Image (cartoon, helix red, strand yellow):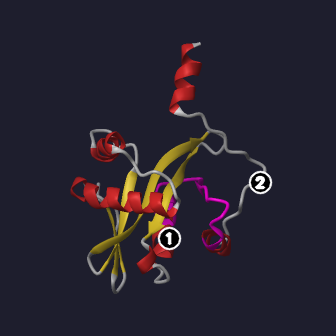
Amino acid sequence: MRGPSVHMTELTIRRAIVDDAGILIELITALADFEKLPPPDEGARARLIDHGFGDRPKYEAWLAEWNGVAVGYAFVFETYSTFLARPTLYLEDLFVLPDFRGRGIGKALLHHCFALATERGCGRMEWTCLDWNKRAQDVYEGLGARRMSEWYLYRLTQDELTKLSAN
């Protein structure tokens, strides 16, 4: 399934295919740099390719191309709400290279994700945003997204999971 594409004068949004794995990893690395985090190591890069383009994809990546050059991406997957009895589209990453910001590319990627969620009958779409990324927060809130204050995000790392599952 290739999914729908969005076309503007210079902008195209399309689903990434396995041949795009290298550029997708470059964009993910650029996001890690922006967030001052370590980029995916060699093993993680191999898993990203397998998990996105293998027999049972665990995520979808959508590339934003400006005049044919990949300059941003959205990384999504579905979760499920038992109370709504509907899927939730979860946006893991949304990133546009700094030199291409201010052209509406990020908003176009967001709107593409909104359309995907609607087409799939999702009851909601969710994502997180770093507390220091005020520019992104302003965009999200300007679109009508509500910052959740009544829910806390919890996390266990792989090492912690291994220890807990051994008990």
Query: Where does residue 25 sit, x and y in percent of width and height?
Result: 33, 56
Image-based side of 87 in relation to 42, left or right: right
Residue ID at (45%, 69%): 109
| Residue 7 % position (x, y) | 34, 78
- Dot 1 corresponds to which residue? 111
- Residue 96: x %, y % from top left: 44, 70
Residue found 74% across the figure and 47% down from its top:
151
| Left or right of 136 on screen, residue 13 | left
The boundaries of the magenta stretch are: 114-135
Q: Is 55 located above or below residue 117 in the figure?
A: above
Q: Give the number of marks.
A: 2
Q: Quadrant of the N terminus?
A: bottom left
Q: Position of residue 154 (x, y in %)?
A: 66, 40
Location of mark 2 (residue):
149
Occupied quadrant, residue 134: bottom right
Labelled disc at residue 43: none
Q: CA distance from mark 2 to mark 1?
A: 24 Å
| Classed neighbour count for the residue bearing mark 1: other residues with Cα under 10 Å, few (<14), some (14–19), many (≥20) | some
